[in-house]
Amino acid sequence: MEHLTETAQFLSATVIAAGLVIGLGGAGAAIGFGLLGGKFLESSARQPELTPMLQTKMFIVAGLLDAVPIIGVAVGFLLLYSNPFLGLFNGK
């Protein structure tokens, strides 16, 4: 019975960790997108003739910035549905 409660505690901690990974990754990306958009608008207002070049660079950076929460979601789903640490935990 003790083994069952330890496994349940481990799985509940895994769910909390996955939620934190997904949530904080999303929050960080949202802050990054806000800063990126604000700086783009500032620079476009200062030099409107550079807007197409700046827009291209902004989309490249936005694509790279978007990869971070997507990787976080993938790691969160990995921990939730096929936890690699559960086999090590049960084998003690």
Image: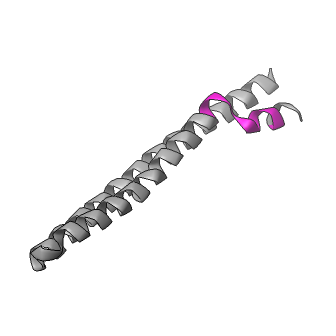
Please state, as top left, top right, bottom left or bottom right, where the N terminus lies in the image. top right
Q: Main secondary structure of the magenta part?
A: helix
Q: Is residue 41 above or below residue 10?
A: below
Image position of 77 with respect to 30: above or below: above
x, y percent for residue 18: 55, 40
Residue at screen point 47% across, 45% down: 70
Q: Is residue 22 above or below residue 82?
A: below
For image coordinates 37% across by 63% down, the residue present is 61
* Magenta span of residues: 79-88
Q: Along the line of sight, which residue is nearer the eye, 37 or 25?
A: 37
Residue 24 seen anywhere in this rendered image of the structure:
no
The image position of residue 51, as x and y in percent, is 17, 69
Q: Residue furthest bottom?
A: 46
Q: Is residue 28 magenta?
A: no
Q: Residue at x 80, y 36 (%)?
A: 89
Visible residue check, residue 19:
yes
| Residue nearest the observer in this picture, 19 or 2 | 19
Quadrant position of the C terminus in the picture: top right
Left or right placement of residue 66 versus residue 41 in this view: right
Front-most of 58 and 38?
58
Could you say which is closer to the camera, residue 10 or residue 68?
A: 68
**Residue 20 position in % (x across, y down):** 50, 46
Q: Quadrant of residue 91?
A: top right
